Amino acid sequence: MSTQIVFAAYKPHAGKEDQLEGLIKQHVPILRDLELITDRPSLTVKSKDGTYMEIIEWRDVRAADTAHEHPAVAKVWEAMAKISDFISLKQLPESEKPFSHFEVAKV
């Protein structure tokens, strides 16, 4: 079964950047411990508007569904949803032009 790359974008609410960074730091290790993502290095970047984007590789097409059912993952995602908005890539200012450039996030 093939893997899938996912781009997840989180726009922090005002004053919640540090909290969101803390949750992002927890996110990938939990997914790796549960063997839901591959060993490919993940990448977190930051948009001009302060949105963080994680780039990860699901182990297979069912991994995302499994993640939705796991309490440890749900806990992180629920906490993220309280302090950020999950947005689509087309909402990022960088998406308006080809060859989008992002800052590497220090999380």
Image (cartoon, rainbow, N blue to C red):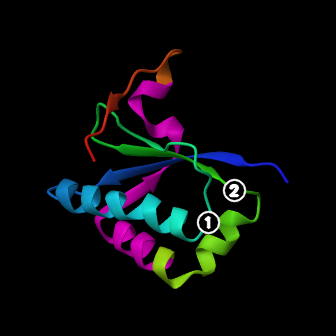
Q: Which stretch appears magenta?
A: 74-95
Residue 81 lies, in percent from the top left, at 39, 68
Rendering coords of residue 107 (x, y %)? 28, 48
Q: Give the amino acid type for the residue marked by disc 1 in the picture.
A: Glu
Q: Is residue 15 above or below residue 96?
A: below
58 over 104 or under it: above or below: below
Check disc 2 and report its element: helix, strand or loop: loop
- Disc marking residue 99: none
Circle 1 crowding by C-alpha within 10 Å: few under 14, some 14–19, many from 20:
some
Q: Please, what is the three-letter code of the amino acid marked with disc 2?
A: Arg
Q: Are marks 2 and 1 in contact (CB under 8 Å)?
A: yes
The quarter holding residue 46 reads: top left
Q: Is residue 88 magenta?
A: yes
Left or right side of 26 for 95: right
In the figure, 54 relative to 64: above or below? above
Q: According to the image, label 2 marks what residue?
A: 59
Quarter of the image where the N terminus is located: bottom right
Tag 1 secondary structure: loop
